[in-house]
């Protein structure tokens, strides 16, 4: 994922549903159009919850990465 440069990094490790999704939405709201948000989570529910949030809001999931029980999402604001 080294080729994707995040403008903002949101670390939600240790938080359980629904906090990663709520914090992701709040962080996206603070971005300018075209900026990239990196979300780091240890909540397994994030694997389905964050893509569902982005689909509902119309933002782009640029990439995902999974290492052990850590999930990373790269999100571009529409």
Image (cartoon, rainbow, N blue to C red):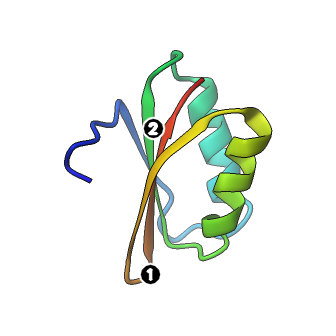
Q: Which of the 4 image quadrants contains residue 72?
A: bottom left
Looking at this view, is 41 or 53 the one in front? Answer: 53
Few, some or many residues within 10 Å of mark 2 (<14, 14–19, 20+):
many
Determine the residue located farthest toward the left in the rendered image: 2
Earlier residue among tags 2 and 1: 2
Q: Which residue: 51% across, 16% down? A: 32
Is residue 67 shown above or below 64?
below
x and y, in percent, of residue 65 in the image: 39, 64
Query: Tag on residue 54?
Result: none
Q: Which residue: 50% across, 40% down? A: 75
Is residue 62 shown above or below 66?
above
With 26 as the anchor, is 9 left or right in this view? left
Few, some or many residues within 10 Å of mark 1 (<14, 14–19, 20+):
few
Q: Which residue: 47% across, 20% down? A: 34
Give the residue pinned by disc 2. Answer: 37
Give the residue pinned by disc 1. Answer: 69
Is residue 8 shown above or below 33?
below
Q: Which of the 4 image quadrants contains residue 70?
A: bottom left
Mark 2–mark 1 Cα distance, whole angstroms, equals 20 Å
Determine the residue located farthest toward the top in the rendered image: 32
Mark 1 falls on what kind of element? Answer: loop
x and y, in percent, of residue 73 in the image: 47, 53
x and y, in percent, of residue 44 in the image: 60, 76
Instruction: Please say if the residues under marks 2 and 1 sit with CB atoms less than 8 Å apart.
Output: no
Q: Which residue: 71% across, 33% down? A: 58
């Amino acid at each position: 994922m080294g080729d994707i440069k995040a403008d903002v990094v949101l670390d939600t490790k240790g938080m359980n549903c629904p906090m990663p999704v709520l914090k992701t939405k709040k962080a996206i709201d603070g971005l300018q159009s075209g900026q990239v948000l990196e979300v780091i989570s240890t909540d397994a529910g994030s694997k389905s919850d964050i893509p569902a949030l982005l689909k509902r809001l119309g933002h782009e999931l640029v990439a995902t990465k999974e290492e052990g029980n850590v999930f990373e999402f790269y999100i571009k604001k529409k």
